[in-house]
Amino acid sequence: MAALLAFAESRSGELRKVAFEAVTAARAAADSSGGGEVHALLIGAPGIAGRAEELGRFGADVVIVVEHPALDRYSPEVFAATAADRLRAGGYRAAFFAASAQGRDLAPRVAARLGVSLASDATEVELQSGAVVARHPAYTGKVIVTLRLTGEPALLSLRPGAITPRETPRPGRVEAAAPAMDPASARVVVTELTQSAGARLDIGEAPVIVSGGRGLRAPENFKLVEDLAAAIGNAAVGATRAVTDDGWRPPTDQIGQTGRLVSPDLYIAVGISGAIQHLAGMRTAKTIVAINRDKDAPIFKIADYGIVGDLFEVVPRLTAEIRKVRGTQ
């Protein structure tokens, strides 16, 4: 059986959570169809090979490592050429990317080079009777579309957080490879990565997101959201488009159809009415808690738990109780 390939995303020499999600999804798909090898493609600066063992822990039989001093940052052309070259030569059945900022740039480039299908933002993948089947939310999450991909290799990008990384140890044997093109000849070069000021966690990888909307009334009131996220301890802060459009929060915090698509374990919506645009970006969260004074707010239709009340009273009390339980006050 042809192997599956998972692209292992890294940053600053560290594997990102989405790398483990991609390997986990590939491992599960291979096992569900009777087994088969899973290969991981890891590209980075010299030393990145030291991370190969971690990928083996999550189910990679082989880790193909491409090291080059110029690849300490993402290079669109070099990464796409290298991934396409590997897929072309390896006879893979399917390739798994993350629907992260990098993956949304990389996967379509690879698909275009190979002239093959790409299912983007998938939340489920399986192999059925020789075909790759992907499911992803559409129409702001109101329906789940099932796609049956024809041709090989089938390319997929996975919504961050939709797959829970699971350890299924395999050898993780390392094979060294060279970039498919000289990085010095790339026409586009990433010269700098800038971290958002004050950012604690990337909202695409955080297990908990506390998000705020216009119900907070003023940008300075976002401190209530930040305090709640800090009390929880492993939470990122998100926002609606209305909030980022008004400049209350940076665009990188925006969650929704035109912002980030997230699937955290827990999503707490504070002062968010539940506009369709916002729901499209977060309704696949595993547990949703909504805090809003309007009992008829649309957000309550998808919330697992709802608190109808004044957020300026509810949130500080909730924060204080969490601090008390955690012993942080």
Image: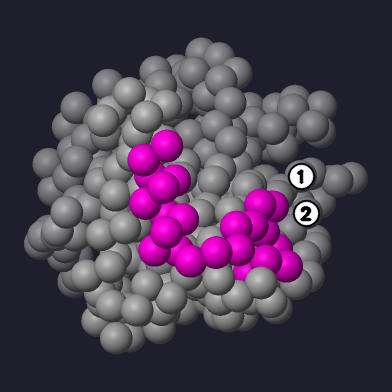
Between 31 and 174, the one nearer to me in the picture: 31
Name the residue tied to disc 2: 133
Residue 231 screen position, x and y as percent = 33, 39
Q: As drawn, which residue projects farthest toward the right?
A: 129
Residue for point 37% across, 72% down: 216
Instruction: Give residue 12's mark.
Output: none
Residue for point 51% across, 13% down: 171
State whether residue 129 is above or below residue 301. above
Which quadrant of the figure contains the N terminus? top right
Q: Main secondary structure of the magenta part?
A: helix
Q: Is residue 313 inside the magenta stretch?
A: yes
Residue 51 screen position, x and y as percent = 32, 25
Say which quarter of the image contains residue 246.
bottom left
Q: Are marks 1 and 2 in contact (CB under 8 Å)?
A: yes
Residue for point 56% across, 43% down: 265
Residue 185 screen position, x and y as percent = 16, 64
Name the residue tied to disc 1: 126
Which quadrant of the figure contains the C terminus? top left
Helix, strand or loop at disc 1? Answer: strand
Between 320 and 121, the one nearer to me in the picture: 320
Say which quarter of the image contains residue 226.
bottom left
Q: Is residue 284 inside the magenta stretch?
A: no
Amino acid type at image mark 1 = Glu
Helix, strand or loop at disc 2? Answer: strand
Name the side, left or right, on which 177 lies relative to 282. Answer: left
Residue 309 screen position, x and y as percent = 55, 64
State whether residue 169 is above or below residue 234. above
The magenta segment = 299-321
Say which quarter of the image contains residue 169.
top right
